[in-house]
Image (spheres, rainbow, N blue to C red):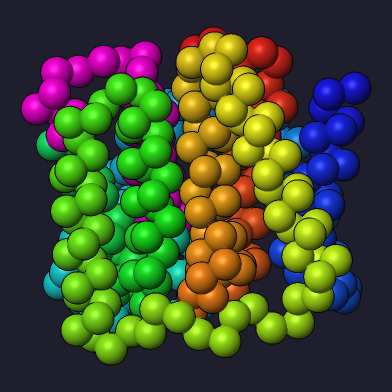
């Protein structure tokens, strides 16, 4: 029953991303639901094993961008770059509670991953995506009692904002067009419910399989608040295909029974 409710809620959330459906958007929604089902079938230990390949791919993109800034640009590659930037950092933070390292190792790892993700998003023209990612990271580090790492993340975020300002990137815009009050309430309500479900699972059992969706929906909530509340000029809501690629694994992990232990 729980899984059925989550699938229905996921369908509602996916619909709210597109607002107006056509054949292509309907197919994308079905593909997202199919990927949620597939991820639910994969044991959590295999998903956690993807941590290092994803981080290495993120670093590889950073190296490629450093030497060839235009090598991976363009819309199809933006999806992969944003996905790697988010999950490269997310996988490590989600595993911090189970594989505790000393303070300096954690600071070094979070710093390298956050800077790498920020650099990749900057080259891909998505630098403001760093803001909701930083907000979610800071909140989760606070909940995990990793308060000493928070000033480092805040400092990197401030540098990213200064770079964005120097590059002439507009922080605010006209807001998301074509979004009526009903769609707004559906979007806010569905994302808020997912955040509550993720938080409840996180509080019940702190494992990789519960921290990952909780952190992910913190990020989604921060992005939605930036776009709808602060009228941010960019965000995941402006990029529904990228949003589907990020949300689907989070919902799939949430479907695992009682936060499946690694």
Number of labelled discs?
0
Residue pictured at 61% horizontal, 20% vertical: 201
Decide if residue 65 is in sight here: no
Residue pictured at 59% horizontal, 74% vertical: 238
Residue 29 image offset from top left, x and y in percent: 79, 58
Residue 123 image offset from top left, x and y in percent: 29, 74
Residue pictured at 37% horizontal, 14% vertical: 98
Magenta span: 83-107
Decide if residue 91 is in sight here: yes
Q: Is residue 213 left or right of residue 102?
A: right
**Residue 66 figure quarter:** bottom left
Q: Say above or below: 210 vs 129.
A: above
Residue 169 image offset from top left, x and y in percent: 33, 84
Q: Is residue 188 left or right of residue 120?
A: right
Q: Is residue 261 left or right of residue 145?
A: right
**Residue 171 figure quarter:** bottom left
Residue 162 image offset from top left, x and y in percent: 19, 73
Residue 48 in magenta? no
Residue 103 in magenta? yes
Main secondary structure type of the part rendered in magenta: helix
């Amino acid at each position: 029953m729980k899984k059925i409710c989550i699938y229905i809620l996921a369908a509602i959330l996916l619909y709210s991303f597109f607002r107006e459906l056509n054949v292509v958007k309907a197919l994308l929604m079905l593909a997202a639901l199919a990927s949620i089902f597939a991820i639910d079938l994969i044991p959590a230990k295999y998903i956690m094993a993807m941590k290092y390949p994803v981080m290495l791919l993120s670093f590889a993109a950073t190296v490629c961008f450093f030497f060839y800034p235009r090598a991976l640009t363009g819309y199809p590659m933006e999806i992969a770059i944003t996905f790697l930037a988010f999950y490269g950092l997310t996988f490590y933070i989600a595993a911090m509670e189970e594989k505790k390292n000393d303070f300096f190792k954690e600071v070094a790892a979070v710093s390298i991953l956050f800077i790498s993700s920020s650099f990749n998003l900057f080259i891909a023209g998505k630098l403001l995506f760093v803001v909701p990612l930083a907000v979610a990271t800071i909140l989760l580090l606070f909940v995990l009692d990793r308060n000493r790492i928070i000033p480092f993340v805040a400092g990197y975020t401030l540098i990213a904002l200064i770079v964005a300002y120097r590059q002439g990137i507009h922080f605010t815009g006209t807001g998301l067009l074509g979004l009526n009050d009903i769609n707004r309430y559906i979007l806010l309500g569905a994302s808020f419910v997912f955040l509550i479900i993720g938080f409840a699972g996180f509080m019940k059992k702190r494992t990789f399989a519960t921290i990952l969706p909780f952190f992910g929906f913190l990020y989604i909530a921060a992005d939605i608040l930036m776009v709808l509340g602060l009228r941010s000029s960019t965000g995941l809501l402006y990029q529904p295909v990228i949003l589907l690629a990020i949300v689907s694994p989070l919902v799939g992990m949430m479907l695992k029974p009682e936060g499946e232990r690694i």
